[in-house]
Structure formats: C-alpha cells, structure tokens
Image (spheres, helix red, strand yellow):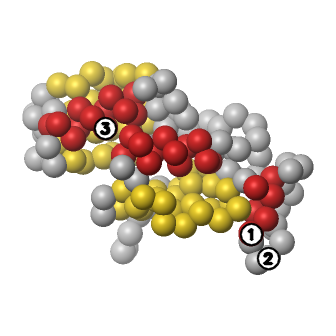
Amino acid sequence: MKKLEPYLFANGRADEMIGFYQQALDAEVQIRMTFGESPAPAQMPLPTGWDAKVMHATLKVGDAQLMISDGDTDKAANHTGFRISLALDSQDDVRRAFDALSAGGSVQMPLGQTFWSPLFGMVTDKFGIGWMIGVNA
C-alpha cells in the first residue's frame, strides 16, 4: 500500500468544510473542481442546481492529503464509525488544532497526557467528523 487518504462527503457543505479546514489545520487547497467544471457529465443524479457544488477537492494538510466532495445528496451527512488521527510535532500545535476543530463541535476526550502521548484528545468537529489529536511520541 502506498497511501491511505480520507475522502469526506460533505452533502452540500464542501466549501464550508474546505474553509474550516484551511483555518483549523492550515490546509492548502490543491484542487477544487465543481460538478459544472467536469469534462464529463455526472455519473449519478444530482440535486437541482448543483453545478457550483464541489465534485472534488484535495487539501494538503502537512504531508497528507484530505479529499472532500459534496457527494450526490443534500441530506444530512452521517460520519460515524471512524476518526481521523492527526499527529503533530508540538503541544502548542496540538492545542491550536484541538481548539480550532472543536469550535462548533464537541469534545469527547479533553486534552491530557496518555501513556502513548504527552498530549492527546478527541473531538468531533461541526461537520460530524471525529478527530484524535496528539503529539508525535
């Protein structure tokens, strides 16, 4: 296996999600293409007016990539059964990311020392994406 990269479906909120992760994670947008910009017609039925919605976006987060799409529905997203693990180099970086990702979301495990990390915590962001954030040990 060469890479394992998360691909998140935002169900109509991709641009909001992209902007949030740009701020919270210092993510850099590498690609952003709307359904209307696609060189091929949609392969699935889309909600009316989705030409301006995000078909595909790639964000660079450190050495990793996070991909995002509005998907094919405007129904509420259900992001359960997983968390994205974010390993950072310093406690200051962990605190900043933790605070930013928890804004408008919820904290499941406050930041604290664990046997595997000097600082670790778990949050669910305002889009329902679960995160585990800690210092590289």
76 vs 56: above or below: above
The residue that appears at 55% across and 43% down in the rendered structure is 17
Q: Which comes sooner in the sequence, label 1 or label 3?
A: 1
Separation (CA) of disc 2 from disc 1: 9 Å
Q: Nearer the viewer, residue 83 or 19?
A: 19
Give the residue number, with chain letter if any, for mark 2: 40
Residue drawn at (54%, 67%) of the image: 31
Instruction: State left or right for residue 133 relative to residue 27.
Output: left
Query: Disc 3 marks which amino acid?
Result: Ala
Q: Which residue is mark 3?
A: 97
Inspect the image, locate mark 1, and give the three-letter code of the amino acid beneath it: Glu
Label 3 and label 2: CA atoms lie apart by 37 Å
Residue 131 sits in which quadrant? top left
Q: Earlier in the sequence, mark 3 or mark 2?
A: 2
Helix, strand or loop status at disc 1:
helix
Along the viewing direction, whichever of 37 and 125 lies nearer the viewer = 37
What residue sits 76% from the left and 78% below the top? 39
Which quadrant would residue 74 be assigned to in this image?
A: top right
